[in-house]
Image: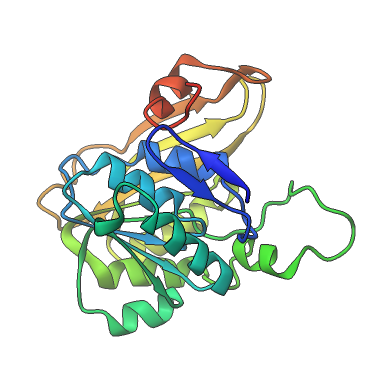
């Protein structure tokens, strides 16, 4: 069994098409709702790593997750049950579209590393494995349906956090603006100092939220992951040191 060991939990990933990656760990470590959320929803949980990070960070939170893929759902459930937080974690086997149409509960924090096509995905010229496609291509959960679901399920003063490719940012912001969600924080992520920005971490709140001060600008920062191969920057180490074993 392929197992990724973190400081406080382990994540089996042998059944999941999409393995644990930097994006998920970055988002789980970076999301900052300011107050400990009573309820958290991880959309498209995969192995369950982000949900597990939320359970570690927020010791009083109930953390729900959604996963449509059969094997990933079973693996996330296994990881939840074998973690120190099993009594506060639950995974729903459904699409997000089905979930937000049927569930009436609202969440204080919704977090998602949504599926998208990565043009730099290492592959042959042949078709990528079907399950990996489902995990990485946004046909399964288009951004507009993700944001609409957030609009339906997020508490009035709640926080929505996500990570997306930087070249999709403007299109994503048009969708969030339509649903009255405003960006309150962004972090642009580079692999190295000389590399282009590939990802943007974003945090949103409703425009009318009591926690949103409309006359304040979005807080913008930048993060570089490595100084050189496997030699990490202080900012990245400080962000992820509560999770990675060797940080």
- The location of residue 153, given as percent across then percent down, is 26, 69
Q: Residue at x 46, y 38 (%)?
A: 26
- Is residue 17 shown to the viewer in this render? yes
In the displayed structure, 122 sits above or below 244; it is below
- The location of residue 65, given as percent across then percent down, is 37, 63
Q: Camera-side residue: 123 or 165?
A: 123
In the displayed structure, 176 sits above or below 50; it is below
Q: Residue at x 63, y 51 (%)?
A: 1
- The location of residue 193, given as percent across then percent down, is 61, 19
Q: Residue at x 60, y 63 (%)?
A: 135
Q: Is residue 186 left or right of residue 167?
A: left
Q: Residue at x 49, y 65 (%)?
A: 143
Q: Is residue 115 left or right of residue 96?
A: right
Residue that sits furthest to the right in the current view: 125
Q: Is residue 66 left or right of residue 191?
A: left
- The location of residue 119, given as percent across then percent down, is 73, 51
């Amino acid at each position: 069994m392929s197992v990724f060991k973190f400081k406080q939990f382990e994540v089996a990933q042998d059944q999941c098409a999409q393995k644990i990656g930097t994006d998920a760990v970055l988002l789980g470590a970076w999301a900052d709702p300011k107050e400990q959320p009573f309820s958290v929803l991880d959309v498209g949980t995969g192995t369950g790593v982000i949900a597990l990070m939320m359970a570690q960070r927020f010791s009083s939170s109930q953390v729900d997750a959604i996963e449509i893929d059969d094997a990933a759902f079973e693996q996330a459930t296994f990881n939840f049950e074998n973690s120190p937080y099993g009594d506060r974690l639950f995974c729903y086997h459904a699409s997000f579209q089905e979930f937000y149409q049927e569930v009436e509960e609202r969440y204080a924090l919704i977090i998602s590393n949504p599926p998208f096509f990565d043009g730099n995905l290492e592959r042959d010229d042949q078709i990528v494995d079907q399950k990996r496609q489902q995990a990485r291509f946004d046909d399964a959960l288009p951004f507009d349906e993700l944001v609409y679901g957030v609009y339906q399920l997020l508490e009035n003063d709640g926080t929505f956090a996500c990570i997306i490719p930087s070249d999709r940012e403007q299109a994503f912001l048009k969708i969030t603006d339509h649903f009255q969600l405003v960006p309150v924080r962004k972090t642009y992520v580079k692999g190295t100092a000389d590399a282009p920005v590939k990802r943007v971490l974003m945090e949103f709140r409703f425009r009318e939220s009591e926690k949103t001060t409309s006359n304040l600008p979005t807080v913008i920062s930048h993060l570089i992951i490595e100084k050189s191969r496997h030699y990490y920057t202080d900012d990245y180490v400080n962000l992820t040191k509560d999770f990675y074993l060797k940080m």
